[in-house]
Image (cartoon, rainbow, N blue to C red):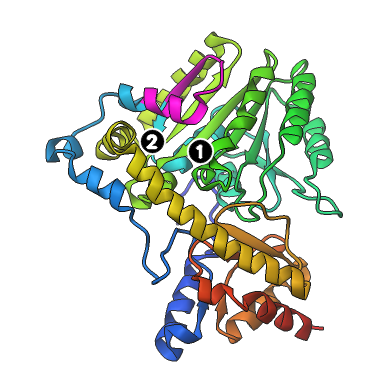
Amino acid sequence: MNFIKESADKNPIVDTVFAIVRKAIAAKEEFGAENVTDATLGSLYSEDGNLVAMDSVFASFDEITPKQKAGYASGFLGNSDFRTLCTQWTVGGVNLPSSVVATPGGTGAVSLGIGEFLETGESVVIPDIAWTSYAIMAQDKQLNAVKYSMFDENDNFNLADIKAKVNSLKGKQNRIVLVINDPCHNPTGYSMSHGEWAELIAFLNEVGETTPCIILNDIAYIDYSYDLAHSRDYMKNFELMGDNVMVVIAMSCSKTLTSYGMRCGAAVIAAKDAESVKQAEIVFEKSARAIWSNVNNGAMHNFCNIIRSHYDEFMAEKAKYISLLKERSDIFKAEAAQCSLPLYPYKEGFFITVKVDNAIRQQYHDALMANNIFTVQVDKGIRVAVCSLPVNKAKGLAQKMKNILDSLG
């Protein structure tokens, strides 16, 4: 008997991360942690192998009363002070009408951005090398996913293919939603230049003359940018958006505050026309009410408490981990260059991706695991999570991976 609606995708989720995490744990138990390189975990880990839970964040959380932690938020849009501070934190330097809808993590914001603008059967434009949940969300909302190539044959950001994929939909559907995971792209660590952003906005303004465009800008990892002071400068380009272009920025408190399980984030909506922003806010609020109702009240209070009362200590503590991320990534990237291990262009962020043809990717991944090196497969590559890779394990890893790659012939 089939109890599920016919239009549902009944294929199981392909577990590309947690199954490998379990294999890495088993290998550590069998061979000893010192003999295993675990580059699977996509959260920030300290040098001693423990999940980072920043002292400044959780000391602040302890100051929040049990009643605040237990209580509902003040509304489906989120607490008013949280929404105000999210606007300042995310787009404080952008002079555009905007609104904030609180979401369960950045994931909730991405889900709203993918699901609330397109009609059933239309297509969302996503990167080919990407967080797999983009495609899962599209399927769940009965949308198609059109993938653009992130990089061209010379490893340049492939604006030409973005334009081609967007143009292929222009005039064929009511609106276009384009997903841009930037800066600190997951999983390559690429960050677009200001010129690339300016060119993209100019192109979407042209497309918008016939087909309205929505940019879904996933900034989950922005607060670990290596040039943090200028990490949001590119957003000034949003002020150049035409009347028929909107941006929805998916912001993640979960990532920013190393509080992954507390599930708090926001969809920040911005456009030239205040009425268009209001319409999106109304639709997002209804969807929030229908799906999750209320975002974690304690987490929202904690974000506000940190910004108001613990900002300096939080930023100082986070800066130490950004420095650690950079040290790890610098080692791996430099050694990869020395031994000619092919990487996608990495600038900053939690992940680096080794460039591997899909035809041999599974074979390569299996060979790495046979040598107690645990990574995650992505389209056209192997993801190395420098966010959880200790410095001593980063050293020499590129050469080991290159030797194994060469052994495949």
Any part of residue 86 in sight:
yes
Q: Is residue 338 above or below residue 321?
A: below
Q: Is residue 94 magenta?
A: yes
Q: Quadrant of the N terminus?
A: bottom left
Quadrant in the picture for residue 82: top left
Residue 95: quarter of image? top right
Question: Where in the figure is residue 316, as x and y percent of width and height?
Answer: 39, 47
Q: Nearer the viewer, residue 34 or 120?
A: 34
**Earlier sequence position, callout 1 versus callout 2:** 1
Residues rendered magenta in the picture: 83-100
Q: In the image, which is nearer the foreground, mark 1 or mark 2?
A: 1
Residue 399 coordinates in the image, percent (x, y) = 69, 79
Q: Residues within 10 Å of mark 2 (few under 14, many from 20)?
A: few
Residue placed at 51% from the left, 48% from the top? 224
Could you tell me residue 357's position as x and y percent?
Answer: 78, 67
Q: Quadrant of the C terminus?
A: bottom right
Quick check: 236 left or right of 57? right
Mark 1 = which residue?
A: 111
Residue at left offset 48%, top offset 36%: 109
- Can residue 341 be seen from the camera position used here? no
Residue 72: x percent and y percent? 22, 32
Question: How far separated are the C-alphas under marks 1 and 2?
Answer: 11 Å
Q: Which residue is mark 2?
A: 291
Residue 87 lies within the magenta run: yes
Residues at discs 1 and 2 in contact (Cβ within 8 Å): yes
